[in-house]
Amino acid sequence: MRKRTLGRTGLEISVVGFGAWAIGGGGWEWGWGPQDDADSVAAIGRALDMGVNWIDTAPIYGFGRSEEVVGRTVKQMSEKPYIFSKCGLEGRNGIGVNELKAETIERQCEESLKRLGVETIDLYQIHWPDPDEDLEEGWAACVALLSAGKVRHIGVSNFNISQLDRANVVATVETLQPPYSLINRGIEKEILPYCAREDIGVIVYSPMASGLLTGAFDVERVAALPEDDFRSHVPHFQEPELSHNLAAVERLRQVGEKHDASPGAVAVAWALRDPVVSGAIVGFRRFDQVSGILPAAAELELSAEEIAFVEGDGA
């Protein structure tokens, strides 16, 4: 599988990483509905066998369940992938709570290390810049964990340019994890050029828009999403956005047919078309999903004409 260098970290990462949000399952406000841990283990193993060399998780995913499953899976492997996790957002009393106090981040790191079964986390990221007034304290806490050898590299997620500037005053931001997809292009105008100038490694999440761009959804399936699947409540799965987004899926499908690739694979390839993006996080919940998306998503390179078409310029 192709690899790219993740900014100044020097890490050579596969262009697709395993996203472990969905394997946290349901039962919490941003859950994906029921999930079988055996399916999760099989999906992780298949992705790594096919060349993926990093897993992105977080303590909020299933309130620790995702990290535990990742930890149990990689424990049995002789050649382990890079493990990326996060801090600042965790589950308390059944809801997600954001906190960036130094003592909280130090505790969260220790708990993540235990769940993951590792001595060091390869990349540790502030999940959200919330509360904003504690951003500098939270980032300084990550720097302290780096100095203590608990983490190898530090980065942030969901930060805007002003927040990146503030963090950089405390210590260099090595990586940024923003959302990015054909239907969520907000980082293109300012954030991606900023990261290119500052040599900040970019790993994007939700390149398939939480599954909407995979081609597996239509109006009926969206309407049937269970209540504990967060996607039943987000705007791009609802009208008036849904019809527009399903039209984008049809364009992805048409391009994919030329390459024997699924709409989801084309959506990931589109997100990777910019070399500033080092890698795309793709969530897999089952063994068969990996084989159906990963090869084409990681290797497909779209022409300028195909890019224009899926973006709607040629539709």
Image (tube, rainbow, N blue to C red):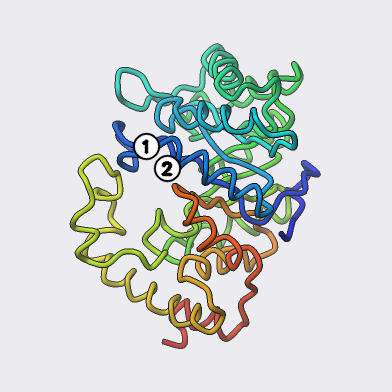
Seen at 48% across and 61% down, the residue is 181
Residue type at mark 1?
Gly
Seen at 55% across and 11% down, the residue is 103
Give the camera-side residue of 301 and 245.
301
In the picture, residue 291 is in which quadrant?
A: bottom right
Seen at 39% across and 74% down, the residue is 248
Seen at 52% across and 38% down, the residue is 41
Give the camera-side residue of 151 and 219.
219
Image quadrant containing the C terminus: bottom left
Task: In the rendered view, tell whether residue 51 sits above or below residue 64.
Answer: below
Q: Marks 2 and 1: in contact by CB < 8 Å?
A: yes
Whole-percent x, y for residue 79 in the image = 74, 37
Residue type at mark 2?
Ala
Whole-percent x, y for residue 286 in the image = 45, 49
Task: In the rendered view, tell whether residue 31 sits above or below residue 216.
Answer: above
Q: Callout 1: 10 Å neighbours few (<14), some, many (20+)?
A: many
Whole-percent x, y for residue 295 in the image = 61, 64
Residue sitting at the far right? 10
Q: Secondary structure at mark 2?
A: helix
In the picture, residue 94 is in which quadrant?
A: top left
Q: Which residue is mark 1?
A: 25
Whole-percent x, y for residue 11 in the image = 77, 44
Image quadrant containing the N terminus: bottom right
Whole-number angstrom distance, CA of label 1 to CA of label 2: 6 Å
Q: Is residue 148 left or right of residue 268?
A: right
Task: In the rendered view, tell whether residue 196 sits above or below residue 81.
Answer: below
Q: Callout 2: 10 Å neighbours few (<14), some, many (20+)?
A: many
Q: Is residue 183 left or right of residue 302?
A: left
Q: Which residue is mark 2?
A: 22
Task: In the rendered view, tell whether residue 124 sits above or below residue 291.
Answer: above
Residue 38, disc: none
Give the camera-side residue of 220 and 132.
220
